[in-house]
C-alpha cells in the first residue's frame, strides 16, 4: 500500500553512492539526481547507501546532505534518508522541544505512538531515542508534558500491541461502556481510558469504537467534542482518530497542511515522508474521499521546485 | 557474574542431541546425563540444541523433556531449556493464573518487569508473550489484576529504560520529594510514583532512593511499611527492592523459599533458573551477607536427588 516506487533494476549501493557523490561536486548540487536516486529506494536500500557512503568516502552521508541541501527540500530528503526508527525518534524529540500550540506540538508524538507501521517499529523508535539522547523517550515525555496528557502519552508510547486480528465482542461491549462512562463524567484521561487505548490491539479497538457508536448513537469523537474544546479533548480525538483509521488521519493532516492560507511544510513533509512506504496509497484514496480532489493536484498547487518534485516522487507520480 | 559453568570444550549441538537422545532411550531416563549436558550450556547453546533436536529427530525437544522428566527436577530442567524470554512469558502467564495470595502471585511479574537482564530482554518477553497467547502481556495484566496494583504493573511491564549510567542529582532530589509526598499522603500508587518507577533508568532510581534516605531519615521501604501491611504496601516494597538491588531481592527469595517449614520449590527453581546466567554470583554473596551461611548448604539441606544436583550445577558447584 506504499506509493514509493522502487526502480525495477536497482544499482548497487556503491554505484548509487558514486552518482550521489558526483551530484554534490562542484558549484551547486544536482538535486534532480538526488531525487531520482533516493526517491526510489526503500528503507533497506537507503540504509545500505548510508553505510556504503561512509565506507567509501569516510564521511557521514547525512552530514553531506545537510551541507549540500537546504530549505524544505533539504529537510524532506534528510528526514527520508534516516533509518525510519531514528527518524521518528528525532521527530519526537523535535516535537517536545517546539513552542507550537499543544495540539500541533504533540501530534507527531501521537502519530508515532498510535500509528506505527508495526508494534516492533515503536520499540525500535524507543531504542533509537535512547541511543541518541541519553534518556528514554518516556522519561522525556514525563518531564516535558504536563498532566493529564502526559499520562495517556506515556501509556501509548509504551505500548506493544498484539498485532493479529483477535477481537472479542464481549470486550468491545464492556469497554465501549467504560469509554462512555468516562466521557459522561468528563474524565477523559481516566485510567480505564488509558489502558483500553494503550494495551488493546487495533482490531479490538476498532470493534470497540464501532460498538460504541451502535450503543450510544454517536461516533466517540463527537461525544468527546461535546466534553469541551480544550487541548485534552482535541488530543483525545486525534488519538482515537489515529488508532481508528491512520489513513484518514494522515489524509486530514495533509489536507490541513495545504488548505487555507500558506502551507505548513513541516506537517506536509512529515506526513508524506513517514507514510510513503507504509500506507500512502490508502491515504491518497482517503484524501480523495474527504476533499473530492487529488492529493497530487494539491501538492502541485501548493509547493514548488525540487521540494515539489521530491514529494511527488514519494507519492508515486510520474513527474 | 553468572554461576553457570559452560564446559571448556563444548560438543557440537548434534553430539549433544545424540547423547540426550540416548539418555531418553529404554526404561527410565539417564538424568545424570541430562544434567551434565544442559546444566553446562548457555542460552544460545541450549537454543541450538532445541533446533538441532527438532531437525535430527523431527520432535520438539521440550516435548521430549516433558515426557521423560517429572516432578520438581523436570520442571526446573524444562524452565531452563526454554529460550529465556519465552520462559519469562510463560512464568508471567502462570503467575496471573494461579490462586496464590496476591504477593506470591505477582512476585514473578514484578521480577520480570523490574529486574530484566537488559531493557531489551523485557521487550523480548512481551514479544514472546504475544506469540504464545494471542494477546499482549499488558492486556492480560489489565484484565486479571485489580486496581491500583494493575496500574503500576502495566507501567513497569511497559518500561524500556535507558541502560547507561546517567544520573542527575537534581532529579534524585525532586523525585525523592515526590515519593515522600506520596507516602505521607498514603497515595502509594500516585501517578508520580508510577512514572518515576517505570520510566527512570535504574542508576537514576538508585540515586533517588539514596537521596530519599538522606533527606527523610529512613530507607523508603520502611516508610512504605509504615503506611500499612496490605497487598499494596507489600508489593511496592518488593518493586522498590527489586529495582534497588535485584541481587539482594533474589537472595531473599531463595532464603524465604528454603527457611522454615517445607520448601517452596517453585520459588526456589524460578530464582535459580532465571538468574544462574545473569547475576547468581552476586546473589550468593548477598545470601551469605543476609543469612550468614552458604546458599549451597541450604540447597543441599532442603532438596534431594536429581533436583538437588541440577540446582547445584546451575549454582556452579562441583558436585
Image (cartoon, coloured by chain):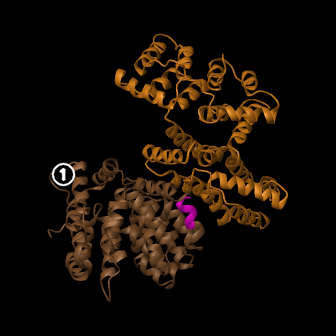
Chain colours: A orange, B brown
Res. B195 visible in picture:
no
Observer-nearest of B309 and B199: B309
Question: In the rendered view, does B36 fall on the left or right side of B194?
Answer: left
Residue under the point 19% across and 79% down: B297
Q: Report the magenta residues as a range.
A: B135-141
SS assignment at label 1? loop
* Residue A17: quadrant of the picture: top left
Task: Please say if B12 is above or below B237.
Answer: above
Question: In the rendered view, does A41 fall on the left or right side of A56?
Answer: right
Question: Does A105 appear in magenta?
Answer: no
Observer-nearest of A6 and A128: A6
Mark 1, Cα crowd under 10 Å, few <14 / some 14-19 / many 20+, is few
Residue A261 percent coordinates (x, y): 79, 31
Quadrant (top left/top right/bottom left/bottom right) for the C terminus of chain B:
bottom left
Q: Main secondary structure of the magenta part?
A: helix
Quadrant (top left/top right/bottom left/bottom right) for the N terminus of chain B:
bottom left
Which residue is at the far bottom? B261
Task: Please say if A62 is above or below A207.
Answer: above
* Residue B20: quadrant of the picture: bottom left
Residue B70 percent coordinates (x, y): 33, 72
Q: Total of numbered circles in the picture? A: 1
Residue named by callout 1: B10
Residue B149 percent coordinates (x, y): 55, 73
Task: Please say if B55 is above or below B193.
Answer: above
Observer-nearest of A67 and A236: A236
Residue under the point 25% across and 71% down: B311
Res. B236 visible in picture:
yes
Residue A244 percent coordinates (x, y): 70, 49
Q: Chain of mark 1?
A: B
Residue under the point 56% across and 23% down: A39
Which residue is at the far front? B26
Amino acid at each position: 500500500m506504499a506509493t514509493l516506487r522502487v526502480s525495477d533494476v536497482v544499482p548497487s549501493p556503491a554505484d548509487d553512492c558514486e552518482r550521489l557523490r558526483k551530484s554534490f561536486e562542484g558549484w551547486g548540487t544536482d538535486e534532480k539526481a538526488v531525487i531520482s536516486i533516493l526517491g526510489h529506494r526503500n528503507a533497506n536500500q537507503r540504509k545500505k547507501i548510508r553505510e556504503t557512503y561512509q565506507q567509501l568516502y569516510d564521511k557521514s552521508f547525512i552530514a553531506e546532505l545537510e551541507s549540500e541541501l537546504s530549505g524544505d527540500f533539504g529537510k524532506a530528503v534528510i528526514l527520508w534518508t534516516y533509518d525510519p526508527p531514528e527518524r521518528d525518534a528525532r521527530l519526537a524529540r523535535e516535537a517536545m522541544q517546539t513552542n507550537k500550540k499543544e495540539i500541533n506540538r504533540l501530534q507527531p508524538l501521537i502519530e508515532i505512538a498510535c500509528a506505527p507501521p508495526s508494534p516492533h517499529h515503536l520499540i525500535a523508535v524507543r531504542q533509537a531515542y535512547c541511543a541518541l539522547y541519553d534518556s528514554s523517550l518516556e522519561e522525556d515525555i514525563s518531564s516535558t508534558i504536563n498532566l493529564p496528557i502526559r499520562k495517556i502519552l506515556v501509556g501509548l508510547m509504551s505500548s506493544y500491541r498484539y498485532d493479529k486480528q483477535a477481537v472479542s465482542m464481549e470486550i468491545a461491549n464492556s469497554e465501549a461502556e467504560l469509554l462512555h462512562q468516562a466521557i459522561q463524567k468528563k474524565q477523559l484521561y481516566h485510567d480505564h481510558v488509558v489502558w483500553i487505548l494503550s494495551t488493546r490491539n487495533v482490531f479490538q479497538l476498532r470493534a470497540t469504537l464501532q460498538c460504541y457508536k451502535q450503543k450510544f448513537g454517536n461516533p466517540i469523537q463527537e461525544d468527546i467534542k461535546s466534553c469541551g474544546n480544550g487541548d485534552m479533548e482535541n488530543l483525545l480525538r486525534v488519538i482515537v482518530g489515529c488508532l481508528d483509521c491512520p489513513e484518514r488521519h494522515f489524509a486530514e493532516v495533509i489536507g490541513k497542511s495545504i488548505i487555507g492560507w500558506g502551507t505548513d511544510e513541516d506537517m506536509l513533509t512529515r506526513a508524506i515522508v513517514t507514510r510513503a512506504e507504509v500506507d500512502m496509497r490508502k491515504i491518497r484514496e482517503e484524501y480523495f474521499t474527504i476533499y473530492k480532489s487529488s492529493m497530487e493536484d494539491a501538492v502541485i498547487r501548493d509547493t514548488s521546485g525540487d521540494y515539489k518534485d521530491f514529494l511527488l516522487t514519494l507519492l508515486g507520480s510520474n513527474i
